[in-house]
Image (spheres, helix red, strand yellow):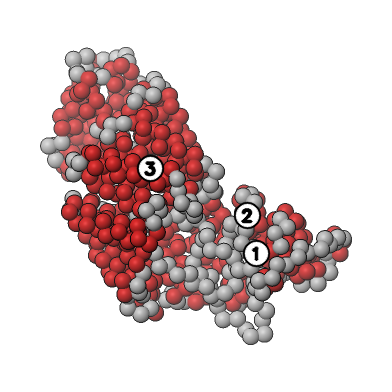
Amino acid sequence: MPGIVSVKTPPEAPPLRISVSEETNGRVDRSEPVIPKSNSPAPRRPPSPSPSTSRAKPSPDRSSGKKKSPPEKVVIDESSLDNPDLGPFLLKLARDTIASGEGPNKALDYALRAAKSFEKCAVDGEPSLDLAMSLHVVAAIYCSLARFEEAIPVLETAIKVPEVSKGADHALAAFSGYMQLGDTHSMLGQLDRSIECYKDGLKVQMEALGDTDPRVAETCRYLAEAHVQAMQFDAAENLCKKTLEIHRVHSPPASLEEAADRCLMALICEAKGDYEAALEHLVLASMAMIANAQENEVAAIDVSIGNIYLSLSRFDEAVFSYQKALTVFKSSKGDNHPSVASVFVRLADLYYKTGKLRESRSYCENALRIYAKPVPGTTAEEIACGLTEISAIYELFNEPEEALKLLLKAMKLLEDKPGQQSTIAGIEARMGVMFYMVGRYEEAHSSFENAVAKLRAGGERKSAFFGVVLNQMGLSSVQLFKIDEAAELFEEARRILEQECGPCHQDTLGVYSNLAATYDALGRVEDAIEILEYVLKLREEKLGTANPDFDDEKKRLAELLKEAGKSRNKKAKSLENLIDPSSKTTKKETSRKWSAFGFRS
């Protein structure tokens, strides 16, 4: 998470500190103007806005390095919680209990009673910031126990305590609460709620510090990463531009902060298909990293540059960039580091695209060997990401069963990890595509159903990706003769894709065609005619008629109009005709026709 705002506090005011042990997952120490260094470039895949892995600061008792003995067991009468000295004492006990390694459950008990004491001792009925501090600690302990749902109401209560208009400490407590709540929602995969919390925190921070403070830039970048994770690239781009503007004023030329901003901006530009702009940002970031002697970060940027060259089909330049990065990673991290494996995967993708299948397969196998025996410190997320990328290459090899095995391994690695629901949903959607390809439609439908449920729960029900998954699930429903369900799925996909991509986008056009065929199968001929006439009008006026789908759709419309002219109440077509509308159509032609309807992994 970005450095916490530290507004000017009166000298006589006690510092607002929230310090818990390293064992907590949620970032809690939000009391000082910490601006974490973002030296490494943004990863190629959308970064996760989950809580920072930075370790919370230890309590002062641990700073000497001496092992602290466990705190003595203290029995406290609940009726004495109205003693104003008891709250601070209990909060200290909570921190000391965690620091001693005695366990979070006892610390949670102390922290909960501290919060009760602060609430009872409120002056004139107004809770103090000590209450907010203790609630933040309670929430952090809940998160360390993976009890994220219980942490949320605690943080929602904590946010209501401070009043920003009352000064610096209140602003700090409010900002801290919003960001911690956003982190907790993120750990549950609730990206939309997470982003709203970060926005509220940024608003408080900007009111306290102004729009151009460097710490505001850190929060803007953090929020931009969350938008990238949610595939909201326009919002992410605007925030990243603001971050660059702030660092341009406050940071020296070619600073590490600016380099990190440019790496994130490159990621956004790449996602939007603006490869030249992405390349420009990466080159500038690389120059900044070279100036600051950040060898590994330069190598990571070289990988990203290679990705851009690969997207532009500049294969020789891509190979050069990848090989440069590979040399650095091998010398600095070792031959079996996941960074080396990630470059192998990129090279495998490149060699497949250039027709060198033997070299491509060899690099895949080398990467898999590294992921099979990862070096200490390798995260499950790194391995899962690599396996997912390799599975995509095996899919290109037309080996869907092998691709499925890798996706299953990746999903098992992530299934117990908090904050990975969106990633797991993406893997399940990919698995659905694989199952569909091999004719295992029940399993395909089940995978899509699981993915849709996770995406709904995570707040991605309005994203273009969600619309595409709904379309894919609809196609699996057709194969299972669940035609009513397919119609509902296509209708929802149409609404989303029209909003997110526009009516002329290929995915939206594919859903239109699927929906028209489904209405035809349901006997809703007039609705099918209306959709096909709309699609043909779009193609003729805006897209041109050279696309082979135009002729197919024109023929289908002519057939429907002919049927409607004969009898409006004609019996609906069977599902066999929905999938193969002409008994004379070859299997190859049918496959081509239906594969164009927005069905993609």
The residue at the point 31 percent across, 49 percent down is: 344
Q: Earlier in the sequence, mark 3 or mark 1?
A: 1
Query: Does 12 sit left or right of 520 as displayed?
Result: right
Q: Tell me which residue sits at (26%, 19%) in the image.
A: 580
The residue shown at (63%, 85%) is 11
Work out whether residue 102 or residue 544 is closer to the camera in this orientation and state it. Answer: 102
Q: Are marks 3 and 1 in contact (CB under 8 Å)?
A: no
Number of numbered callouts drawn: 3
Q: Give me the C-alpha separation between circle 3 and circle 2.
A: 32 Å
Which circle marks residue 368 in the picture? 3
Residue count near mark 2 (Cα–Cα under 10 Å), binned few <14, some 14–19, many ≥20: some
The residues tagged by marks 2 and 1 sit, at their Cα atoms, a distance apart of 10 Å
Which of the pair 433/216 is nearer the observer?
433
Location of mark 1 (residue)? 20
User: Where in the figure is residue 95, as x and y percent of width and height?
Assistant: 70, 65
Is label 2 in a helix, a strand or a loop?
Answer: helix
- The amino acid type found where label 2 is placed reads Ser
Please name the residue that numbered disc 2 is placed on. 144
